[in-house]
Image: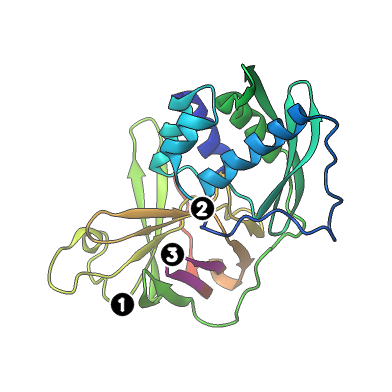
Amino acid sequence: MKILLILMIFIGLYLYLQPGSLQPPSSASAEPLKYSNQQDKWKADTALYLYKTLENYNFDHAAKSYVTDPDAVLALKDGWRLVADSYRVKAINDLGVVMGFTRFCYPEIDVQIYMQQRGQRYYVEFERTLREQARQHSNTKPLHQYCYEFKEQPLQGVIMSSPWLADRVETRIIDFGSRKELGVDIVSARCDDYPFCITHHDQGGSGMTIGISSLDFSGSGGNLGGRQYISISSPDHTTVNRHEGSYKITQLKNGMVRLHLAIPEFESTELNGYIDFILPAVH
């Protein structure tokens, strides 16, 4: 189970299910699936009911009612995210059903949903299905280099419902003994003694910080996902990683770098704009 969760984190399979957000596609985009017998319909219904239940965050009911391995579903309570805007059953086969998953700026991916029959009912082999979904997702490329539009303004936005404005970029070398890594954070004007201000608990605090160490500064940027993400941290040690959005790297004069970020709204957090800074080398 731990290996599966690590695999999902690596390729960017994060739960992006909001109640009511996943709906079967309209008949204009796909013809309704025709069932040759009642068993085929039972298979399709099981798959659709499972994902609809996950959409509503009812992991306990999903674990009890629709899968062969309940523990695999219950392990998702801590933040698994399925990146999809819609889904549908496209075909029925001896292994179960084939479902198509679509999401913004990516082509539809087909995933085999593995099933077992027990009596008159069908149950999804959930962990096996997740592995297949992870494999398909990792091989899918976005339709555009930058899926989200950048605003030509200083980096700003809202973090957890509070207005936020970038002031500068701070860096530090993190020594792990056998290797060194560069820590890169975007901070607001309230952070006056970096890096200690990150963990201040004084009145008013130091505001939120945006960790960008996981971005690839060697190229021109792209879309967030997988190993490339930003970390939003607060002084109370709460950190939220965002894997949806786009970033662009522009090399300026005298070693300056311009970073554009476009982070779409989710859970009262949204960022857009650019910030210039010098990125030091790690020796």
Residue 152 part of the magenta segment: no
- Taking 8 as reference, is 228 above or below it? below
- Residue at which label 3 appears: 267
Please state the horizontal and vertical placement of residue 227, each as a whole percent of the image. 54, 44
Residue sitting nearer the eye, 97 or 105? 97
Q: Earlier in the sequence, mark 2 or mark 1?
A: 1
Asked which quadrant contains residue 161, the reply is: bottom left
Secondary structure type for disc 2: loop
Q: Quadrant of residue 248?
A: bottom right
The residue positioned 59% from the left and 31% from the top of the image is 130
**What residue sits right under mark 1 in the picture?**
189
**Going 32% across and 67% down the picture, which residue do you hit?**
208
Q: Position of residue 200 (x, y in %)?
A: 17, 62
Write the start and end of the magenta stretch as one range. Answer: 262-271
In the picture, residue 133 is in which quadrant? top right
Q: CB atoms at circles 2 and 3 under 8 Å apart?
A: no
* Residue under pointer 2: 229
